[in-house]
Image: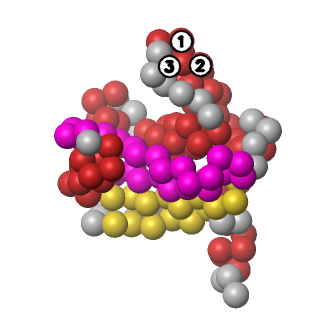
Amino acid sequence: MDSPIEQFLNNILFFAEDTDLPAIDQIKVSSWIQNTIKNEEATYQSINIIFCSDEFLLRLNKEHLSHDYFTDIITFQYEQSPIEGELFISVDRVRENAEDRKLSFENELHRVMIHGVLHMIGYADKSEEDKIVIRSKEDYYLSEIVK
């Protein structure tokens, strides 16, 4: 049987691998992700958010995507509808990107999480046009979590 917190999080679970779990309000973030998915008229089964180190994510990037560079997030989607997948997020990269962009760590972390969720919903970021759309969605949903 699920614990009360797992029931409330509704299958959006948080884990840490090779790093500490960031101090975030998991209930608030889970609700925000659920509302985003609902607002985009999608459904989900389960989403695991795994926070990790640069080194851990680099290994995944090389092993699964044949990319030899650091990144802030890798999304593994196992089912399209309802959405089922995992977001691997480099805490190191998020921290560095936040400093470079003069943003709070929390704001950048939220941006990266919602970016991964938007990919699972079906938004791409390969073309310049796609990037404009996904960034606009990110900005909109970022404004929703601070309310």
SS at badge 1: helix
Q: Tell me whether circle 1 and circle 3 mark residues in contact (CB < 8 Å).
A: yes
Q: Residue furthest top?
A: 129
Rounded to the nearest angstrom, the CA distance separating label 1 from label 3 is 5 Å
Residue 19 image offset from top left, x and y in percent: 30, 64
Q: Is residue 79 magenta?
A: yes
Rounded to the nearest angstrom, the CA distance separating label 2 from label 1 is 7 Å
Q: Tell me whether circle 3 and circle 2 mark residues in contact (CB < 8 Å).
A: yes
The amino acid pointed to by label 3 is Lys
- Residue displayed at 49% across by 24% down: 125
Point out which mark residue 131 bears. Answer: 3
- Residue displayed at 71% across by 44% down: 37
Q: Nearer the viewer, residue 22 or 45?
A: 45
SS at badge 2: helix
Q: Around disc 1, counting alpha carbons within 10 Å, would you say few (fewer than 14), some (14 to 19), or many (20 or more)?
A: few
**Image quadrant of residue 68?**
top left
Span highlighted in magenta in the image: 67-96
Q: Tell me whether circle 2 and circle 1 mark residues in contact (CB < 8 Å).
A: yes
Residue 69 image offset from top left, x and y in percent: 21, 38
User: Would residue 25 appear left or right of 41 to someone viewing this image?
Assistant: left
User: Would residue 3 appear left or right of 57 to someone viewing this image?
Assistant: right
The amino acid pointed to by label 2 is Val
Q: Is residue 98 magenta?
A: no
- Residue displayed at 27% across by 52% down: 63
Vertical comparison of 27 with 121: above or below: below
**Residue 139 in view:** no
Point out which mark residue 133 bears. Answer: 2
Rounded to the nearest angstrom, the CA distance separating label 3 from label 2 is 5 Å
**Residue 10 in view:** yes
Q: Around disc 2, counting alpha carbons within 10 Å, would you say few (fewer than 14), some (14 to 19), or many (20 or more)?
A: few
Residue at numbered disc 1: 129
Residue 54 image offset from top left, x and y in percent: 24, 51
